[in-house]
Image (tube, helix red, strand yellow):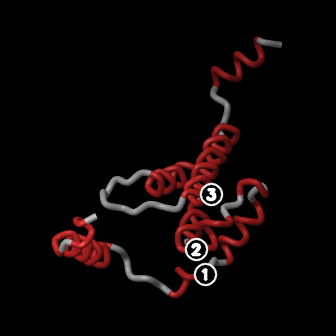
Amino acid sequence: MLEALTPTRLDKEVAAAAHWIRVRRPARDGDRALTGTTRHWLRKLPARRRPLRLCVTFPRVANRIAWCWADPSMTQQVLDDLTHDRRGGRRGFPTGVMRELRRLREFNDQQRIEVRPETWLESVLRLLAW
């Protein structure tokens, strides 16, 4: 408990916050609201997969996911970046938002499997199974 009151801990937290302010891109007006692209993406998602908490709490993140959703591999990279702390020192998302991000990741993985074109060998094996 005493550690929470020490000046060194406060200095570290202030330094960390200053670091992220320098590293993170400046906020834009569109970061505080969902774009038309994101609204359209949400309507196309199955109701149980819609990340409503994410959209309300972090519209900037929802916009980023919606913009890359047409490319499954890019979406996978974005969702990986959001769910895994590679930079260190991130606070992370609230539990409900993390659950929504994981559901989106699962859906993206399923979607990619369904969209993936059948290989030549898979076609032959499917025909032989008849």
3 or 1: mark nearer the eye: 1
Residue of label 1: 33
Q: Secondary structure at mark 2?
A: helix
Compared to 116, does 57 lie above or below?
Answer: below
Q: Residue at x 83, y 13 (%)?
A: 130
Q: Are marks 2 and 3 in contact (CB under 8 Å)?
A: no
Q: Residue furthest bottom?
A: 29
Compared across the picture, whether 70 is left or right of 19 comes to right
Compared to 105, does 116 lie above or below?
Answer: above
| Mark 2 vs 3, N-terminal side | 2
Compared across the picture, whether 53 is left or right of 3 comes to right
Compared to 15, does 117 lie above or below?
Answer: above
Q: Between marks 3 and 1, how big is the CA–CA gap?
A: 21 Å
Between 2 and 97, the residue placed more toward the observer is 2
| Mark 3 vs 1, N-terminal side | 1
Of the residues shown, which amino acid type is indicated by label 1?
Ala
Q: Secondary structure at mark 1?
A: loop
Q: Specify the label residue 59 is tagged with.
A: 2
Between 107 and 68, the residue placed more toward the observer is 107
Mark 1 closeness class: few <14, some 14–19, many ≥20 residues within 10 Å? some
Residue of label 3: 70
Of the residues shown, which amino acid type is indicated by label 3?
Ala
Write down the quadrant of residue 40 in the picture: bottom right
Q: Are marks 1 and 2 in contact (CB under 8 Å)?
A: yes
Give residue 60's position: percent from left, percent from top.
53, 73
